[in-house]
Image (cartoon, grey):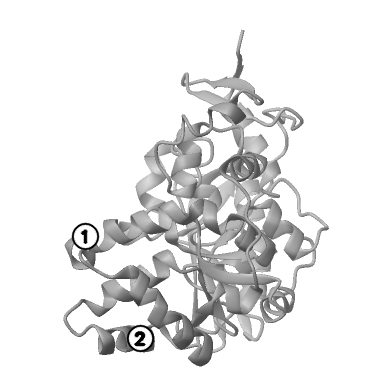
Amino acid sequence: MTETITQRQLNRTLLSRQLLLERCDIRPLAAMERLAGMQSQIPNPPYIGLWTRLASFQKAELTALLGSREVVRAPWIRSTLHLVSAADHQRFQVVIQPALARSLRSFFGKRARDLDIPRLIEIAIPFLETETPAIGALRDELQRHFPQHDKEAMAYAVRSFLPMLQTPPSGAWGVGTRATYTTAANWLGEAKQSDLATLFRRYLAAFGPASVMDFQTWCGITSLKTALAPVLKTLVAYRSEAGAQLVDLPDLPLLPEHAPALIRFLPEYDNILIAHKDRARILPEPHRKKVFLSAGRVLGAVLIDGFVGAIWKVSREKSRARLSINLFEAVAAECQAAIEAEGLRLLRFIDEDAGDYAVEFD
């Protein structure tokens, strides 16, 4: 008979695999590979994501990894910008290619019809490898060759079919969103290809137990049940309290549902909030729309007893740094004090040069 896993067991197991039950004494590169990459729609959130997970993390550590080419910022899972280890990027880029191609059709539709993608790539490669341009310059270069086509669609087509990544300082703390690009081959060398089954196992190690639908939500590739059938036979099967069929790696334990979970601040776009079709294991459904806004925006969140119970933001006025916390429900005074203490540590990490710090509950 298939074992049933409670919601709290799923929660604690997910927190453990995501390094959120206790701060871990491992290096940032190892953490990023364990997490299967970190979404980086804007540069600062991955730094905060590592700070909340690792003991004694310093911003300079991640910036150095970008500079040494051990970590790259690139269009990756779900065709969104991620920080990912160079090894994982080269290993799995070909596996996630269908999701990248699908995003072109999803975002541009008719505007991408009749594009000569092989010719666009042929033009783009020497331009990217010689100029390391901003994306706007690539658009202009492509339109110079094809003035009749939509330049945004052409540049996105290149992004979708040619492995590209951003060059430092793009992606580093405080740099902003303007970025320069080159090809992955030019920056990292030849790719070492893996397969879908290996990526699925990596996903389970970071986010399991989970369903095939959960995996599809995370990676952006659809209709994978048949392709994954051989690997599914090698996994342990579970059932959620809601009756969903879940699988997991056989050598990974489940955590007890009452394992202690301390206050943790998650940055914007943290993958732990995005990596499942059913997000109830971390984000209660009544609060989902408070965290997920329009246009794909995912706010910073506070984990209270392991589940999202608040959102947060930082502002700066002159020398005063302010962390505003919006609790979804009233909490005990002891819990509020713990949130305030952890929030103050976060605020000092984010805004090191402020003269005054304030943690406030809105």
Assign the N terminus to one quadrant of the image. top right
Say what secondary structure mark 2 lies in.
helix
Q: Is residue 151 above or below residue 71?
A: below
Disc number at residue 34? Answer: none
Q: Quadrant of residue 224?
A: top left
Q: Quadrant of residue 7?
A: top right
Disc number at residue 136? Answer: 2
Q: Is residue 79 above or below residue 124?
A: above
Q: Residues within 10 Å of mark 2 (few under 14, many from 20)?
A: some
Q: Position of residue 117 (x, y in %)?
A: 33, 69
Q: Is residue 251 above or below residue 87?
A: above
Residue type for callout 1: Gly
Instruction: Quote the CA–CA distance across marks 1 and 2.
Output: 21 Å
In the picture as drawn, the residue positioned furthest to the right comes out as 25
Q: Is residue 305 visible?
A: no
Question: Of label 1 and label 2, which has the lower sequence position?
Answer: 1
**117 relative position to 42: left or right:** left
The residue shown at (61%, 71%) is: 72
Say what secondary structure mark 1 lies in.
helix
Residue at which label 1 appears: 109
The residue shown at (74%, 73%) is: 58
The residue shown at (45%, 41%) is: 216
Total marks shown come to 2
